[in-house]
Amino acid sequence: MKKNVFSLLLVAALMAATPALAQENAGDSVMTHAKGHRFSIGGYGEVAYSRNYYSDSEFRYSHADEHKNDPSHGRFDIPHAVIYMSYDFGKGWTFGTEIEFEHGGTGSAEELEADEFGEWEQETEKGGEVELEQFWIQKSFAKWANVKAGHIVVPVGLTNAHHEPLQFFTVYRPEGENTIMPCTWHQTGVSFWGRHKDFRYELQLLAGLNSDQFSRSYWIKNGAKSPTEYEVANKFGVAARVDNYSVPGLRIGLSGYYGHSIGNSSPREASGTTADYKGVVAIGSIDLTLNRFNWIVRAQADYGYLGDATQLSSIYNRTNKKSPFHHSSSMNNVSSHAYAVGIEAGYDVFSQIKTLREKKHRLFLFGRYEQYNPYASQMGANSYQYTDVKRMALGLNYYPIKQVGIKAEYSHRFLKSQYNDEPSLNLGVVYEGFFL
């Protein structure tokens, strides 16, 4: 599968004739867009509507036959609303930050419950998160040597390195990488990065992931989150990325992560499972973007390994029902392996219409295929093969101006034969730009 994906992309690159700009690393975007200005404010956002033509019952996998004919369900969402701010202090010192509101943020209110003896109760009005996705100080010594310290983007995989909504065709972020890894992956640490000729490179030292947050359906995705006021750093991780831009319009990237995860929690035990095992997390990824001849093609292949996976079910924080970590017995099993492979390709049909091309309007017709599995190594007595997903999407992206996109897609998840497939229709409006 992986070999076929990248063979097709190589052929496409050789056939391309008109170069265009390839993708730039998202970790640079705060300062790149603000270049030449002392203080800048910007951001990006997404508004989406989905109609899912499958059951939303919590038993749709365990009792698939009973929910085959359940009604469809719809939802509006604001997946991400982000504010950028940056400041250039001069003499090579810069500051950047990114505040993200996921799914509209969070909210609560006091409510008088008529059916509970007139008691006042605090009710959660909506879910979501407010996160500080970037917060760093950088010293630039030269183009090839920059040091950044603080809360930074971890550029492992295609989506983490290029997660702005104008950098993928689908309404929501590519599903495979968004399932098995943190997305957007951001942690506190220090980074050395630079550019030399046709290469961009980066090496990061970070706080380790927390194995208490790993789960069957999302592998290590939640491992970068902390339920405490601080980010535990009993263990550390290392991330690295290299991108090559030698061929005009083509970017090829390699990235990876290595770190220990068991015992990177609070409180830290002196003995027992968390002291005896490491929980090695190792991830390797290759990705590319081709932007030539009115085509945009993006592809990635990610493979991950988790050491001591069988030991996670006996970790105290995962079994203690009072802890803020995963403690459901059905979620304790975590796979030792996970993967995600995907490719999308879109053609700008307005490029063939002179008046629209001159106005710089663009309309991409696209298709996407991906396959992923956060539970590739089945564990325990039960089978959870619904985690093995193949997904196809067809749709369009219309860009009336450079900073705004209107998206529409029909997608279909193909699951194992004992489960029901999951088709959906998704619509979205997105933007990205700087205001000041």
Image: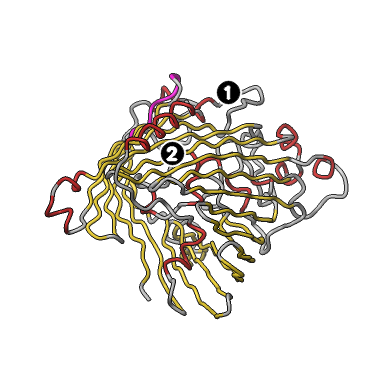
Image position, residue 424 (x, y; %): 32, 37
Category of crowding for the residue at label 1, using alpha-carbon neighbours closer than 10 angstroms: few (below 14), some (14–19), many (at least 20): few
- Label 2 vs label 1, nearer the camera: 2
Residue 262 vs residue 153, the one in the foreground:
153
Q: Could you tell me residue 184's position as x and y percent? A: 51, 53
In what quadrant of the picture does the C terminus appear? bottom left
Earlier along the polypeptide chain: callout 2 or callout 1?
2
Label 2: element kind: strand
Image: magenta residue range: 417-423
Left or right: residue 376 compared with residue 293? right
- Left or right placement of residue 172 versus residue 30 in this view: left
Colour scheme in use: secondary structure
The chief SS type of the magenta part is: loop
Residue 418 sits inside the magenta stretch = yes
Residue drawn 44% across the image and 63% down it: 82
The picture places residue 156, in percent across and down from the top left corner, at: 56, 47
Q: Furthest residue to the top?
A: 417
The answer to whether residue 138 shows anywhere in this view is no
Q: Is residue 171 above or below residue 92?
A: above
Residue 299 badge: 2
Residue found at x 48% / y 34%: 341
Label 2 environment density (alpha carbons within 10 Å; few <14, some 14–19, many ≥20): many
Q: CA distance from mark 2 to mark 1?
A: 30 Å
Q: Residue at x 49, y 59 (%)?
A: 124
On the image, numbered disc 1 is attached to which residue? 383
**Amino acid under label 1?**
Ser
Q: Is residue 273 above or below residue 77?
A: above
Is-magenta flag for residue 392?
no
Q: Residue at x 50, y 57 (%)?
A: 116
At label 2, the amino acid type is: Ala
